[in-house]
Image (cartoon, grey):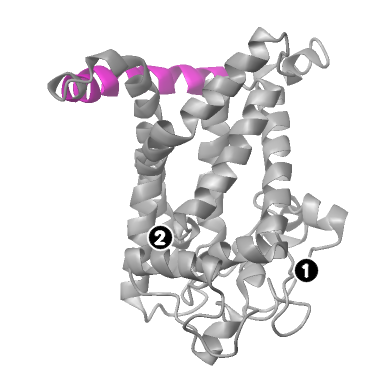
Amino acid sequence: MLDALIDGFGLAQQALFEGVVQPVMFALGLGGRLEEGFVATGWLLVGLVQLAVIALGFGLLERWRPVEPVLDRPAVRTDVVYTLIHRLGLVRLALFFTLDPLWQAVSAWLGLHGLRPLSFEGLWPGVTDVAWVAFLLYLLLFDLVDYALHRAQHGWDWWWQLHALHHSQRQMTRWSDSRNHLLDDALRDSAFVAVALAVGIAPAQFVAVVALTQLLESLSHANLRGDFGPVLGRLLVSPAFHRTHHAIGTGHESHGPGSLGGCNYAVLFPVWDLLFGTARFGRAPEPTGVRDQLDGRDYGRGFWAQQALGLRRLFDRRAGWPGGAR
């Protein structure tokens, strides 16, 4: 089944590349970068599929059982801009011209010195070399990495100044997942690439892991009333579980005013929160946002304002908001 999906995706990627991307690249004088263009086409195709599911499928779910009425439409439209930037590959394009050459150089250096990546496929011959088993192991591994990074985003004060932008949305919807500072994204993506190089995950599997993770993240941010029940809700992060993470003074500042901390950090599987004692289940829906917004701190209304204010918080945490430094 997984092999058939990968093969079907490959055929669609080839068709999109030959019919659209390749002619555009030749017209722009980029004929020498066709290999990179083919990879970028894969990310573009994934993004288009995700956007269709988010807009139509998750949109129907939000209309079916919303947690609250959406009153701040301009804020949601800004989140749509973030989603388009991320899911149509613009962030990946920026990383391609900045960080990817560095990681390729590191990978080449490791290969020259005989340091080969680990591989899940060889751990248990006859079992882990089955495509879906290896994929599940990679999914668990990268989700654990995501959990650790998420704890750092909340526990390290300097990183929180960037990540706080993600939590500043007072009206969570299916579009809210991509509201991130670009520097925050670059740090997280760099860690993911490092792990991918270390374990030697195949490019097609890496795309599948990232695509599924992103899609389920969009669902967990949706304005949808639901906790998936007592069994599935312990196996998969639900909108109710993740909304608690975004709750003012509960999900990410739960150690008291002005402090960092939190709960429900898991991205896909609550097992990590259960193992590390950070899980909170069964809470009623609460208002979302960041505590200092109640004191008047401004996180910006549009994309560029939000990005600029994120850098300002990072380099001068005393500037422009009541109450002094964190």
Query: Mark 2 Cα within 10 Å, few/some/many (few <14, many 20+)?
Result: some
Secondary structure beneath label 1: loop
Question: Within the magenta stretch, is there residue 14?
Answer: yes
Q: Is residue 208 above or below residue 264?
A: above
Mostly what secondary structure, the magenta segment? helix
Circle 1 sits on which residue? 280
Q: Is residue 317 above or below residue 194?
A: below
Circle 2 sits on which residue? 60
Task: Say if mark 1 contacts mark 2, CB within 8 Å.
Answer: no
Answer with the quarter of the image where residue 162 lies. bottom right
Residue at point 79% right, 57% down? 273
Q: Is tag 1's residue or tag 2's residue first in the polypeptide sequence?
A: 2
Please state if 270 lies on the left or on the right of 190 as rendered.
right
Residue at point 36% right, 54% down? 55
Mark 1 to mark 2 CA distance (whole Å): 27 Å
Which stretch is magenta? 1-24
Tell me where residue 136 appears, x and y as whole percent: 69, 31
Please state if 296 lies on the left or on the right of 283 as rendered.
left
Q: Nearer the viewer, residue 218 or 117?
A: 117
Q: Is residue 3 above or below residue 267?
A: above
